[in-house]
Every structure is written in C-alpha cells, then in structure tokens.
Amino acid sequence: MASLISSGDKESFQNSYLDFFDTFKEAIVIYKTPKKVFANVSAPGVYGYGGKSNVENYTLVPVSGLFSGVVTYSNDQINEPLSDANERLSDGEIMIEVSGDASNYIKNGVTTLIDIDGVKFTVKSSERRRNFLSLEFYSFKLKVTD
C-alpha cells in the first residue's frame, strides 16, 4: 500500500515527536496497593476479646513505580485564591500521556494514587491509545485528590 510519507520522513517525524516527549516529560510516581509482609504467620490469636484482640504482626510495604509522561492541564481549571496564603488552588482534571510500560503499570492491579510534582491525583478514566506514525502512547484523565 502506498504512503504519503516516505520512510525517511516518517522516521524523522517519529524522532521529532520523541524529542518533544523527552523535552516536556515530567516525573510521575504511581502508587499501588501496599503489600502486607507478615513477621510471624504462626502467632496465636487472643479469642473472645473483640475484633482488635489479635496482635498485628505485619507491616505495610509501599509499592510504587517512577515513570515519565507529558502532563496537560485542562483549560477549565478553577483557580481560587487561598485566603491565608498568597497561593492559588487549582482544582480540576489533567491528562497524562505515557509510554506502554507506565500504562501497563497503571492498568495492572489497583492504582491508589499518582503523584506529579507533589500533587496527588486519582485515575478517572481508562486508557486511551494514541498512535503517531506507529509510535504508541497512552493517555489517562486524572482528578486532583485531597
């Protein structure tokens, strides 16, 4: 099948898009459900004293991954000045565009939070595949959380 773009031009456009991605990417920390690590699996329970009678013999180990992506802020952000500080509060949605490894990490298991520049977000949408001349990226809509 004939193409309007030569293979040399296609490669040049792909490299330009990857340069754009590398230039404007931000660090994205994706947090998953923490894992329970048990200290003693044969610890006896104390029965007859209610629900909290057993000694908690486990620790929660955080599970997270560090990825890169391009963050796009919505045009309809609500900006309200905070009364006690000279800051502005942005409450709204953003879009992130990530590569396949970050997309798989978000989709597999329970993603509890996504941290971008110290601001916490939750995933609001399923992935949307974006194809640019055979390069695949994935976008997700995120919502600010408290």
Image (tube, grey):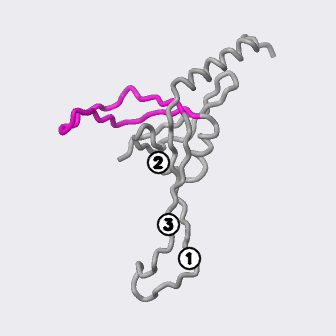
Query: Looking at the rendering, which quadrant does residue 9 occupy?
Result: top right
Query: Residue type at mark 2?
Result: Leu
Up the image or down, 133 lies above or below 63; here it is above
Eye-nearest disc, 1 or 2? 1
Q: Nearer the viewer, residue 42 or 114?
A: 42
Comparing labels 3 and 2, the label whose residue is closer to the camera: 3
In the image, what residue occupies the spot 57% across and 34% down? Answer: 98
According to the image, label 1 marks what residue?
40
> CA gap, disc 1 to disc 3?
11 Å
Q: Is residue 34 magenta?
A: no
Q: Quadrant of residue 23?
A: top right
Q: Which residue is mark 2?
A: 113
Q: Residue at x 52, y 50 (%)?
A: 111
Q: Which residues are magenta?
A: 69-98
Indicate left or right for 102 with 78 as reference.
right
**SS type, badge 3:** strand
Of the residues under marks 3 and 2, which one precedes in the sequence?
Answer: 3
Residue 96 lies within the magenta run: yes
Q: How far, Cα to Cα, is label 3 from label 2?
A: 20 Å
Of labels 1 and 2, earlier in sequence is 1
- Above or below, comparing residue 20 to residue 102 in the picture: above
Q: Amino acid at mark 3?
A: Thr
Residue 139, percent across and down? 55, 34
Circle 3 is placed at which residue position? 59
Q: Contact (CB < 8 A) between labels 1 and 3?
A: no
| Disc 1 to disc 2: CB gap under 8 Å | no
Question: What is the spatial separation of the Cα atoms under label 1 and label 2, in whole angstroms?
Answer: 30 Å
